[in-house]
Image (spheres, helix red, strand yellow):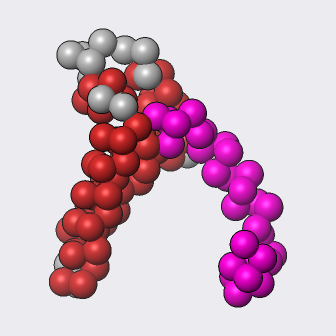
């Protein structure tokens, strides 16, 4: 099991937890809209670090983006397995062809 799978499982386990006991539970308790807002904030921070070129800061912000993406997905009952299945479906398809098919 990868770190990403373990993180996804931990987030899923926190869905019913007491918001006072877990940051993840607190975010989820605020609803999907707040989870999406937080994901957006973290994405912007990652973009800023990518532009600046600070590899260590970008790595840290990218980890935050992935965590908050998984929380946002969990808030809407979308699993990492769902996303992996979609990626597998797209595998071997040109990005240009896939985008044109949308």
Figure quadrant of the N terminus: top right
Depth check, front residue: 92 or 35: 35
- Residue at screen point 21% across, 75% down: 48
Position in image of residue 8 (x %, y %): 50, 37
Residue 81 in magenta stretch: yes
Task: Find the magenta span and give its range.
Answer: 73-102
Horizontal placement of 47 versus 102: left or right? left
Residue at 46% across / 34% down in the picture?
Answer: 75
* Residue 44: percent from left, percent from top: 26, 67
Magenta portion: prevailing SS class: helix
98 in magenta: yes
In the drawing, does residue 1 fall left or right of residue 55? right
Image vertical order of residue 84 relative to residue 52, above or below? above
The quarter holding residue 31 reads top left
The mark total stands at 0
Residue at horizontal 72 percent and vertical 72 percent from the top: 102
Name the one closer to the observer, 55 or 81.
81
Decide if residue 1 is in sight here.
no
Q: Quadrant of residue 96?
A: bottom right
Q: Is residue 9 left or right of residue 97?
A: left
Q: Is residue 62 left or right of residue 57?
A: right
């Amino acid at each position: 099991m990868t770190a990403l799978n373990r993180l996804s499982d931990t987030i899923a386990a926190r869905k019913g937890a007491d918001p006072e006991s877990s940051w993840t539970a607190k975010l989820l308790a605020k609803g999907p809209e707040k989870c999406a807002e937080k994901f957006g904030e973290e994405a912007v921070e990652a973009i800023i670090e990518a532009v600046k070129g600070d590899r260590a800061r970008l790595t840290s912000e990218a980890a935050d983006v992935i965590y908050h993406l998984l929380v946002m997905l969990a808030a809407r009952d979308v699993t990492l397995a769902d996303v992996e299945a979609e990626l597998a479906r797209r595998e071997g398809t040109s990005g240009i062809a896939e985008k044109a098919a949308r």
